[in-house]
Image (tube, helix red, strand yellow):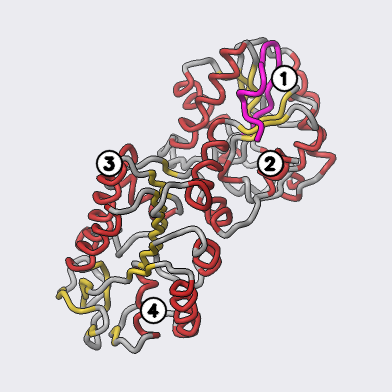
């Protein structure tokens, strides 16, 4: 696996695919700069070698050239985070971009305009990728969030750098973190899968059963498993057409010696509202008109014990409706348990939109080993898919 450390960038122009698809408010101010901060180590290493950086990214889903999706809006923020002046050019290919890249001196940074202003980017157009390739000497992919898409800047452009392409630090770290969970991690390995739907996690569960020793199934998807086993779940969320599959998963897990842990009690509410009436009930005895909205105290204690005996932990998905304060306790307590295990030397990887949001909201970001920057990309990796953006560098 070639990384930045395999190259010396002295007097070289690095063409770096970063993921600066960051949220902006109505005044075009960046409201979450995590992705920019994550790219900093890669950029700084290249500058310290005596190279220059040409940064390319997309922002949002523009239809052609639309000013609100221009990367000029984030240039000042990027400059602020990197502590180095950032030049901006209002195109990403063609004469203007080539001229700006050619005049770049060692230690300088150039930010290109939004790649998706050209439909050729998402189409994975080879001619467009070739135009991008003219801008740099070495291609660096550091955008895990888009590694699962075979776009011109994430995959096709690598063909024009047969011997001079590598992973940036961020992307290398993402790959290593997932490898730890699936292959090289210290045992026992635990996967915590939560969220609403079994259907969105089927391929992940099937792929990780060979790698894990324990599987915690929490959140909305647990009710499909409980109902499939004959439990009463009241008005709780359930995928009726996935009950057979749930039983199949439990059977496969048993055959592979994987211990599956499903909540035993829940906080049940009489309405989907933060102010609803609540009671704690056994998960398989939820009364009609009530729905499970969070893990109950016995489940929280049970999950804590499983987490504390694990040495490698994957957390993907919350244990309840954590967006509502009244139903966030299960998710927060799970976060506390994982933080404690991490402090005791376990490796913990958090990934997937909702768990990342929960980790940030409740302040666990610095208390786990690694928070993945790519939702879809991470899920596909866990499903066992070799992502096109990664394959392009390995070829």
Tell me the residue at 55%/66% (across/down): 203
Query: Between marks 4 and 3, how big is the CA–CA gap?
Result: 32 Å
Query: Which residue in the structure is indicated by mark 1?
Result: 101
Image vertical order of residue 54 relative to residue 382, above or below: above
Q: Are marks 4 and 2 in contact (CB under 8 Å)?
A: no
Q: Could you tell me which secondary element the residue under label 4 belongs to?
A: helix
Q: 118 and 337: which one is in front? A: 337
**Where is residue 46 drawn, in percent x and y?**
60, 19
Q: Which label is found at residue 344?
A: 3
Query: Between marks 4 and 2, how big is the CA–CA gap?
Result: 39 Å
Q: Which label is found at residue 165?
A: none
**Where is residue 317 drawn, in percent x and y?**
39, 59
The magenta region covers: 1-17
Query: Between marks 1 and 3, how big is the CA–CA gap?
Result: 48 Å
Q: Could you tell me which secondary element the residue under label 2 belongs to?
A: loop
Q: 265 and 254: which one is in front? A: 254
Query: Which residue in the structure is indicated by mark 4?
Result: 225
Is any part of residue 113 visible from this angle? no
Q: Are marks 4 and 3 in contact (CB under 8 Å)?
A: no
Q: Could you tell me which secondary element the residue under label 1 belongs to?
A: helix
Q: 312 and 384: which one is in front? A: 312
């Amino acid at each position: 696996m070639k990384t930045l450390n395999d190259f010396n960038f002295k007097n070289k122009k690095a063409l770096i695919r970063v993921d600066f698809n960051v949220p902006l408010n109505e005044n075009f101010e960046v409201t979450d700069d995590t992705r920019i901060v994550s790219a900093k180590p890669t950029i700084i290493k290249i500058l310290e070698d005596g190279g220059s950086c040409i940064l390319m990214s997309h922002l949002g889903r523009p239809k052609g050239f639309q000013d609100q999706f221009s990367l000029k809006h984030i240039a000042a923020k990027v400059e602020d985070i990197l502590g180095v002046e950032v030049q901006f050019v209002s195109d990403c290919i063609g004469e203007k971009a080539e001229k700006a890249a050619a005049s770049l001196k060692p230690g300088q940074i150039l930010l290109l305009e939004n790649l998706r202003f050209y439909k050729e980017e998402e189409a994975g157009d080879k001619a467009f990728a070739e135009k991008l390739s003219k801008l740099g000497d070495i291609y660096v992919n550091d955008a895990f969030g888009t590694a699962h898409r075979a776009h011109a800047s994430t995959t096709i452009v690598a063909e024009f750098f047969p011997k001079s392409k590598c992973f940036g630090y961020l992307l290398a770290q993402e790959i290593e973190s997932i490898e730890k969970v699936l292959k090289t991690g210290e045992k026992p390995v635990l996967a915590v899968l939560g969220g609403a739907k079994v259907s969105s996690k089927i391929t992940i569960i099937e792929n990780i059963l060979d790698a894990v020793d324990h599987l915690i199934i929490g959140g909305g998807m647990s009710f499909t498993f409980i109902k499939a086993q004959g439990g009463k779940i009241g008005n709780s969320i359930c995928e009726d057409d996935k009950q057979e599959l749930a039983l199949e998963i439990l059977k496969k897990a048993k055959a592979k010696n994987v211990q599956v842990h499903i909540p035993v009690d829940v906080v049940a509410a009489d309405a989907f509202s933060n102010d609803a009436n609540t009671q704690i009930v056994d998960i398989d005895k939820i009364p009609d008109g009530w729905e499970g909205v969070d893990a109950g105290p016995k489940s929280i204690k049970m999950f804590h014990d499983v987490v504390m005996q694990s040495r490698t932990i994957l957390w993907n998905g919350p244990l309840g409706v954590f967006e509502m304060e009244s139903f966030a306790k299960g998710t927060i307590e799970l976060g506390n348990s994982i933080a404690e295990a991490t402090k005791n030397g376990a490796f913990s990887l958090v990934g997937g939109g909702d768990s990342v949001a929960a980790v940030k909201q409740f302040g666990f970001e610095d208390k786990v080993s690694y928070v993945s920057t790519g939702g879809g990309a991470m899920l596909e990796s866990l499903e066992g898919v070799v992502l096109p953006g990664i394959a392009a560098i390995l070829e």
